[in-house]
Image (cartoon, coloured by chain):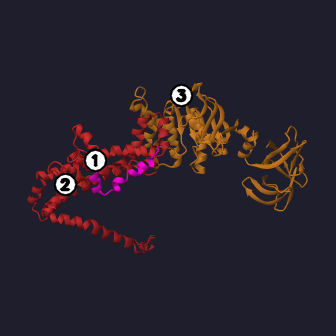
Amino acid sequence: MSALAARRRTLPGFGLTMGLTLSWLSVIILIPLAGLFLRTLELSPEQFWAILSSRRTLNALRVSFGLAFAAACVNLVMGSIIVWALVRYRFPGRRIFDAIVDVPFALPTAVAGVALTALFAEKGWLGAPLAALGIKVAFTPVGIFVAMIFIGIPFVVRTVQPVLQDLDPEIEEAAGSLGASRSQTFIRVILPSLAPALLTGLALAFARAVGEYGSVIFIAGNLPNVSEIAPLLIVIRLSEFRYADATAIAVVMLVVSFVIIFAVNRLQRWARSRIPAR
Amino acid sequence: MTIEVKNLVKKFGSFAALDGVDLKVDNGELLALLGPSGSGKTTLLRIIAGLDWPDSGEVSFNGEDALAQDARERHVGFVFQHYALFRHMTVFENVAFGLRVQPRAVRKDEATIRARVKELLDLVQLDWLADRYPSQLSGGQRQRIALARALAIEPRILLLDEPFGALDAKVRKELRKWLRSLHHEINVTSIFVTHDQEEALEVANRVVVMDKGRIEQIGSPDDVYETPASAFVHGFIGESIELPVHVDGGVIRLGDRPLQLAADGLAPGASKLFVRRHDMLVGPPGSGAFEGAVQHVRNFGPVQRAEVALSGGETIEIDAPRDKELRAGDTIGLNPRRYRIFAG
């Protein structure tokens, strides 16, 4: 860009804001992440591999990612149904339900953990009838799954809601007058229009569930190899002063999360490219 | 396909969108529903399409009760003002939609569908846009695609809701002509809604003028323009001079001045006198029913428009030929070549 063009830019402050953005992002995000990678360099490749391939690490990663993905999928389905009801119908108490969706955003995660544990414990309101059916929730992986669903639900609802609200009712009328049944209209017209928002909601709920710590550790029981999540294993390694071990697990979580979010992002871009802006 | 509507009533809360509407549409007609916004014309169209339901009344197609069927069973093509195209589908898939969602038993095979879509895109002269998305098209192109999509299901009736309302003036005029010739070609019974009188008079075979949920007049474009049935129709269609008059003992008075106009057969009482602007003939002072002073004159294409202050105090606008010499300050006589008087 020529100096003249730069001087003629209509919006002032590019240099200042860009500089602040770069330094802030470096301090807050890039430098800590780089530190994480540097720390793992203290380990030889063999040591690094040994930590990762240990049964306890692998199980913790499997529990974290596997349950987070399952919980995100459940949230995708249930969240969509909730959004549909909140947006499409007028019923008494709708606004209250709408507000309740945000509770997992606002509630301190430890509070959520304690509440869920009390509810699903063997003598709890929900735990007791489930125990009678032979289902144990608290202190098992099922408990982790429940906590992850709890904290993830608002992400799906809040990303899909505005898109569904903006969906023009005329396109459904058009589909109907062209002979489409309600289910054909839903599958061929409504769902594809919502797809990018649904994928975003899925990715956010998943990322949140992978990183969740506070509510999970209360309800999980934290049995190594069974109901121990990766973030907890990191904390345990730190408390044993095995910093390199902790960072190695952290790096793997970081890389896997990044790859998954990146993949979802590409999927989203693909879905959105098929629905160009009006 | 003939359409018959009997005593249709539809209320939104306390507002009567349709207040007892009766209408018969003949096979192959191109009918315009004309009226100001809030006159109920769109509601009527949506009820015929099955997108809305009346509180009471009957709708029948070829004598068959249409209200027993929902929109998808009626085989009615509907074109929306804002196109309502499926944004995530190509133009081709938009047009093919109605063919793809048919029940399996009657659904055509892929080759037949492709051929049919191609034929429709040719009909609307947009075959070269088949692979585009709606957002890549202009407004006029989108509306033509919406029309092709509606025609794909071989509708028994074609309904268009303000089809050119969102387009700019030049495109509107082109599409009007195009719609009329298209109708001539496919000859399907069609109703379109508009608030634009020029559009209604130019395109339709027959015009239905609506106001406040009621039909004011049904007739050919000539009928509604030349012999308006009510004060509303006279005021709404064409440019009119409207003067409050009083009919009393065979004399028409404007204020307290008697007018030299025939009052045969008029009911006594407060009335409205309507004259088309170009029907007000200019003469020397004292020569006509009215007299006034020219305020100012503007030239308007083939006519000159003069603002005239009548001696009674009202100000009116008249259209006079360009060769008539009119200057601000002149006192002129005015004589209506044709006029109509409605009670009320």
Distance, label 2 to label 1, CA atoms, is 24 Å
For this view, does A236 lie left or right of residue A117? Answer: left
| Discs 1/3, front | 1
Instruction: Determine which quarter of the picture holds residue B39.
Output: top right
| Sequence-earlier tag: 2 or 1 | 1
Q: CA distance from mark 1 to mark 3?
A: 51 Å
Q: Which residue is mark 3?
A: B68
Select label 2 or label 1 by which is in front.
1
Label 2 neighbour load within 10 Å: few <14, some 14-19, many 20+: many
Q: CA distance from mark 3 to mark 2?
A: 61 Å
Q: Could you tell me residue A178's position as x and y percent?
A: 48, 35
Could you say where residue A46 lies in the image, as x and y percent from the top left?
8, 58
Residue segment shown in magenta:
A91-116
Residue B323 lies, with reference to residue A2, above or below; the image says above
Q: Is residue A111 magenta?
A: yes
* Residue type at the position of mark 3: Ala
- Left or right relative to A93: residue B265: right
For the residues beneath circles 3 and 2, the answer to whether they share a chain is no
Q: Which residue is mark 2?
A: A230
Q: Residue at x 18, y 49 (%)?
A: A227
Which chain is depicted orange?
B
Q: Which residue is mark 1?
A: A119
Find residue B43 and report its image quarter: top right
Most frequent secondary structure within the magenta stretch: helix
Q: Counting other residues with Cα less than 10 Å from the Cα at mark 3, is it few (<14), some (14-19), or many (20 or more)?
A: few
Chain A drawing hue? red
Chain name for mark 1: A
